[in-house]
Image (tube, coloured by chain):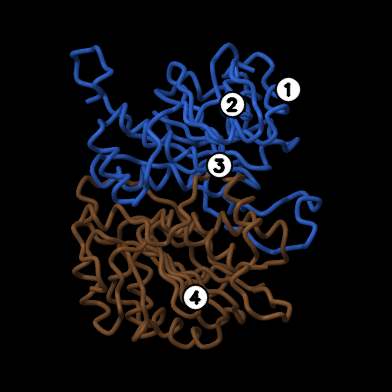
Chain colours: A brown, B blue
């Protein structure tokens, strides 16, 4: 149990997790947090649904040829288990980022996020996954972060979001937003610590041989891009 | 170009990469290094084949029910692009670990590794992926490492390997073996630094917002398990 919990009632742990995928998602945005949860699922009863627009394999490959000028044929495809019409009730929804978050055909995905968020215990975004949450409107008025390269666009995409530039991750209510790519591992481990207890988070970090960042304000990458210290 | 290269000839960069997958592979063993390479492939012409016994989706889920006592339904499936009979010529083969490395039906996979290794420029293993390379015989007489939990079994599986207990990763000739799970990201970034140059490695680490470990001997996890300082 988290030491932060003030309730004496037993905590109802989340069971049903969903990962949202779309063409040109960033692989490690998804698989960093997921592998934390893969290991957790050996100690707690947990289910994962992988949710996409259709049940066809979803690839990390660039859709936009201008992003692949050398014509590399390099990417990985994951198999969805559900589409937006038949996804089961979820306790936790995880949204990775990637170049695909800017696609102009995401309306069904944004609508799925919009209608699913009110039913969730927790929403977790990684990197520009927060742009999807922002486009769906669920971050309005909330504190959130995103990756640090391209921060100016972050502000454009979510003009009503209280974006925090210097943060490895940000928690506002039941929404956990992580900074770029590998920040998702730290955010996921902090989430596990909050919900399942510190021992679980430390055990999993040890199994992953990961030197985790436990301070959510640790962010040398915001410094690298000279981002403002206050909410931007 | 690497500063370690003593040749004045232009380096021929690897182009064709392969990832070997098998049931119950560890997701982050694969997707940590792969996402380093996904980003690299936007700057260099590179191809990736995902190679498995068949073209069916390959899942990270435990096959052995004893490893999933709470009956979680949690895992991710990736799509192979090739099987062992039609994989293209490769410059680099990447082998992740995971509980599946101990399966008793891996003979075709081990045979694929055995016959492919002599054709490679580089072999990269992550975590217990080195157990597969050891079982295939390609690590005999070489220095190598593996994950640090379960080190005793590492020695049993590769009795003729010069296992290095304290190492984030080990390079012997053209074989790069990484320690547990997230060590694969550091090893992959070191590989990129050696082959493509330090600027590329630093650029990608920055894009991933990853504070990389650049010292291959950094290994608090070996200390955690009280592993011997010398070759074990």
Q: Which mark is residue A123?
A: 4
**Residue sitting at x 44%, y 81%:** A113
Please determine whether, in this image, residue A24 is positioned above or below residue A207: below
Which numbered mark, 3 or 1, is in the foreground of this view?
A: 3
Mark 3 and 1 residues: CB-CB less than 8 Å, in contact? Answer: no
Do tags 2 and 4 sit on the same chain?
no
| Residue annotated with mark 1 | B156
Distance of label 2 from label 3 (alpha carbons): 21 Å
Which numbered mark, 2 or 4, is in the foreground of this view?
A: 4
Which numbered mark, 2 or 3, is in the foreground of this view?
A: 3
Screen quadrant of the C terminus of chain B: top right
Left or right, A127 with respect to A229, comes to: right
Residue neighbourhood size for the residue with mark 3, other residues' Cα within 10 Å, grouped as few (<14), some (14–19), many (≥20): many
Which numbered mark, 4 or 1, is in the foreground of this view?
A: 4
| Residue annotated with mark 3 | A209
Q: Give the structural element (helix, strand or loop) at label 3.
A: loop
Q: Give the structural element (helix, strand or loop) at label 2.
A: helix
Q: Indicate the quadrant where residue B107 lies.
A: top right
Please determine whether, in this image, residue B23 is positioned above or below residue A146: above
Please determine whether, in this image, residue B110 is positioned above or below residue A59: above
Q: Which mark is residue B133?
A: 2
Mark 2 and 4 residues: CB-CB less than 8 Å, in contact? Answer: no
Do tags 3 and 1 sit on the same chain?
no
Distance of label 1 from label 2 (alpha carbons): 14 Å
Left or right, A121 with respect to A41, comes to: left
Residue A82 in the image, given as x and y percentages of width and height:
56, 73
């Amino acid at each position: 149990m988290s030491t932060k919990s003030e309730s004496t009632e037993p905590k109802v742990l989340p069971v049903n997790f969903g990962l949202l995928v779309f063409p040109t998602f960033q692989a490690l945005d998804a698989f960093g947090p997921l592998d934390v949860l893969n290991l957790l699922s050996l100690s707690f009863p947990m289910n994962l649904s992988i949710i996409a627009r259709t049940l066809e394999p979803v690839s990390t490959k660039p859709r936009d040829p201008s992003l692949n000028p050398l014509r590399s044929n390099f990417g990985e495809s994951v198999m969805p288990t559900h589409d937006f019409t038949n996804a089961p009730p979820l306790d936790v929804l995880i949204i990775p980022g990637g170049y695909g978050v800017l696609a102009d055909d995401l309306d069904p995905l944004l609508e799925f996020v919009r209608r699913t968020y009110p039913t969730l215990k927790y929403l977790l975004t990684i990197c520009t996954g927060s742009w999807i949450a922002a486009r769906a409107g669920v971050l309005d008025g909330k504190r959130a972060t995103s990756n640090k390269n391209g921060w100016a666009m972050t502000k454009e995409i979510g003009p009503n979001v209280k974006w925090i530039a210097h943060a490895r991750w940000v928690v506002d209510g039941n929404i956990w937003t992580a900074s770029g790519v590998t920040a998702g591992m730290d955010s996921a481990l902090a989430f596990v610590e909050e919900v399942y207890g510190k021992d679980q988070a430390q055990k999993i970090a040890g199994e992953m041989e990961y030197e985790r960042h436990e301070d959510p304000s640790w962010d040398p990458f915001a410094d690298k891009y000279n981002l403002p210290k206050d909410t931007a």
